[in-house]
Image (tube, rainbow, N blue to C red):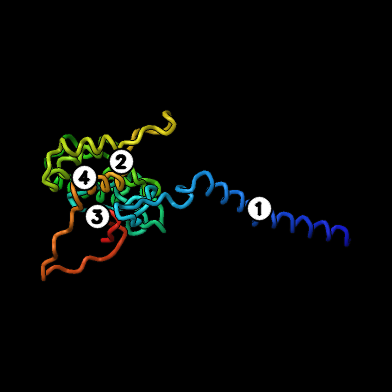
């Protein structure tokens, strides 16, 4: 009986050391050695070295001078602590109403856009935090961004091409554009687009997971 108990205790001790000590040390140390940037959260900094976000997590941009990501169902929207989809099915009236409202808003905000509203601009991702758009969905917004910044669309299109990422390892996924990185590139080339000064009658803007400029809480 005592022999079996000692064997069980030794097994428990060895398992505890392996799973709570050696294994985490190897994984954490290996990640820091081989993939330090990714292991630290893929953080993105601006020209002043200030952290403005992560290239893995979407931010909600609402101002005309910035490209907007796809909508988010994470928490109250773009909440990195509550990653999730909406769980609404194709027969959901709530989903239909939200998509129609977003499509109408986008058509109003992008009167010069060519073609129908891209589906990804009115549908959420499974995580609610997808930081990417297809190049087509980004180009659909170019006319609005160019007008808001007072530049020709032809000056913005090269930025879109530069920020377009190819397929992973050349075969996985589709070409995509990281919206946060593209908006930072806009600010570097054309200057940061500041929000208009609030009027006396303006109500305070609530804080949340969206940003009017990269890294600036709304």
Percent position of residue 202, x then y: 14, 68
Residue receiving disc 3? 213
CA–CA distance in space, label 4 to label 1 = 47 Å
Label 4 neighbour load within 10 Å: few <14, some 14-19, many 20+ = few
Which secondary structure lies at badge 1? helix
Please identify, in this view, whether the residue under mark 1 or under mark 2 is nearer the observer: 1
Please identify, in this view, whether the residue under mark 4 or under mark 3 is nearer the observer: 4
CA–CA distance in space, label 1 to label 3 = 43 Å
Q: Is residue 136 above or below residue 14?
A: above
Q: Earlier in the sequence, mark 2 or mark 4?
A: 2
Q: Residue at x 20, y 36 (%)?
A: 157
Percent position of residue 102, x then y: 22, 48
- Kindly check if marks 4 and 3 are in contact, taking CB atoms under 8 A apart as contact: no
CA–CA distance in space, label 1 to label 2 = 40 Å
Q: Earlier in the sequence, mark 1 or mark 2?
A: 1
Percent position of residue 84, x then y: 40, 52
Q: Earlier in the sequence, mark 4 or mark 1?
A: 1
Which secondary structure lies at badge 4? helix
Tell me the quadrant of the picture where the N terminus can be found: bottom right
Residue receiving disc 1? 22
CA–CA distance in space, label 3 to label 2 = 18 Å
Label 1 neighbour load within 10 Å: few <14, some 14-19, many 20+ = few
Which secondary structure lies at badge 3? strand
Please identify, in this view, whether the residue under mark 2 or under mark 4 is nearer the observer: 4
Residue receiving disc 2? 133
Please identify, in this view, whether the residue under mark 3 or under mark 2 is nearer the observer: 3
Tell me the tag on residue 189.
4
């Amino acid at each position: 009986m005592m022999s079996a108990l000692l064997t069980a205790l030794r097994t428990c001790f060895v398992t505890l050391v392996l799973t709570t000590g050696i294994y985490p040390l190897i994984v954490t140390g290996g990640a820091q050695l081989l993939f330090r940037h990714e292991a630290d959260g893929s953080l993105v900094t601006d020209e002043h070295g200030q952290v403005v976000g992560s290239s893995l997590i979407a931010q909600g941009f609402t101002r005309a001078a910035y490209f907007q990501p796809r909508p988010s169902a994470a928490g109250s929207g773009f909440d990195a602590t509550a990653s999730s989809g909406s769980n609404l099915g194709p027969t959901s009236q709530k989903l239909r109403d939200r998509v129609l409202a977003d499509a109408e808003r986008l058509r109003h905000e992008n009167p010069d856009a060519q073609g129908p509203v891209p589906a990804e601009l009115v549908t959420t991702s499974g995580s609610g935090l997808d930081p990417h758009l297809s190049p087509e969905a980004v180009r659909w917004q170019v006319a609005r961004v160019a007008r808001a910044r007072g530049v020709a669309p032809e000056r913005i299109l090269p930025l879109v091409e530069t920020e377009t990422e190819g397929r992973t390892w050349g075969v996985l996924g589709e070409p995509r554009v990281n919206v946060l990185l593209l908006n930072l590139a806009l600010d570097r080339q054309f200057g940061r687009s500041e929000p208009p000064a609030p009027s006396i009658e303006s109500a305070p803007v609530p804080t949340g997971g969206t940003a009017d400029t990269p890294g600036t809480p709304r």
